[in-house]
Amino acid sequence: AVAALRITAPLQDLFRGLTMLRGSLPMVSTALDLLDLPADRPTLRTPGVPSPAGVFPRHTIRLQQVSYRYPGHQDWVLQDVSLSIPVGSRVALVGSTGSGKSTTANILLGLLHPQQGQLELDGIPVEGLDLPAWQANCAQVPQTITLLNRSVMENVAFGEPAEQVNQDRVWEALEAAQLQEFVAEMPYGLFTQVGENGLRLSGGQRQRLALARAFYRQASFLVLDEATSALDNRTESDVIEALEVIGRRCTTVVIAHRLSTVQRCDRIYEFADGRLKAYGSYSELQQSSDSFRELAQLEGRSATA
């Protein structure tokens, strides 16, 4: 019995380590995929690549008859999707899990390349040397975020050399993400360490730090993929109000399950089974789409329960 008791703790550590390893396998796979990228893949430093401002459209970002399936799979996850995003607008993608929202966003970001159809900027296809220039205009806040075991400032200004970080912009980004007061009260302010993957922060604070990172980049095209899902209703409302200001400086695509997140969007695209089912404003979809109306009513009852 004593021997069994002595090995209990080491066994728990072993199983805990195996669980962490299993949970990290998707990230390992992603890292290996990045290592497989061709060495001649164009970057902003590649001769002939235009400036980011040179490719950003004046009028419209469009997907034209796009169909996509993941390598090694026969089933299409997107089929004949065409949508238009006016520059400066805020657009939402809604639908059930697996309906194609995130795949659509990744094609808009140039992270995936459709087998059929194309991404167009003011009617010009994005391909070849234009791709890195377009991506330099983009920022994304995913639902699952990764933070460094570094300071708040280093996490907000991710990838920027310390001597080039603009602290005023960092504070502006934190304010927009409704995190300024919290950081100001931390022991070392911007220089406070957040711990491994934000261990010292709550889920909502980690999500807001990721939002601040995107705001710091001052991107012209911003994708929020369930980015407010970890926030309580009041904080989410504050962040959405901040987007009212910041969103007019850039074009924003919001992916959300909670319809309260997308009520103020200029246009909403509803997806179902990899196809575009309906689109319009929030009030228009309540009238034209039975599924959207039912979801809005269900959410309304949940909010008042």
Image (cartoon, rainbow, N blue to C red):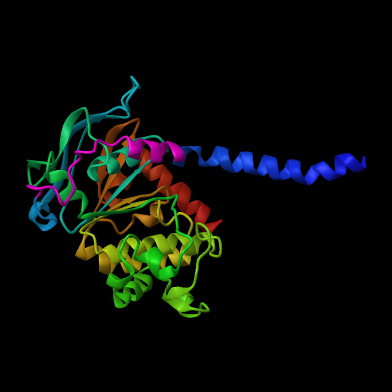
Q: Is residue 42 magenta?
A: yes
Work out which residue is located at the far front of the displayed protein and give it.
Answer: 39
Q: Is residue 191 above or below residue 197?
A: below
176 or 21: which is nearer to us? 21
**Is any atom of residue 232 visible in this view?**
no
* Left or right for 249, reference 18: left
Q: Toward which corner of the image does residue 75 lie, by quadrant?
A: top left
Q: Is residue 92 visible?
A: yes
For the point 45% across and 42% down, the residue is 27
Kindly report the secondary structure that dominates the magenta region of the rendered protein.
loop
Q: Nearer the viewer, residue 30 or 212?
A: 30
x and y percentages locating residue 16 in the rendered image = 66, 44
| For residue 102, side relative to residue 80 (left or right) | right
| Quadrant of residue 210 within the rendered picture | bottom left
Image coords of residue 90 (percent x, y): 25, 56
| Residue numbers of the magenta segment | 28-49
Relative vertical location of residue 218 with respect to residue 16 in this rendering, above or below = below
In the rendered image, the quadrant that contains the N terminus is top right
- Measuring from the top left, give residue 107's x and y in whole percent: 25, 40
Q: Which residue is more in the foreground, 158 or 56?
A: 158
**Residue projecting furthest to the right:** 1
Q: Is residue 121 above or below residue 192?
A: above
Residue 14 drawn above or below residue 206: above
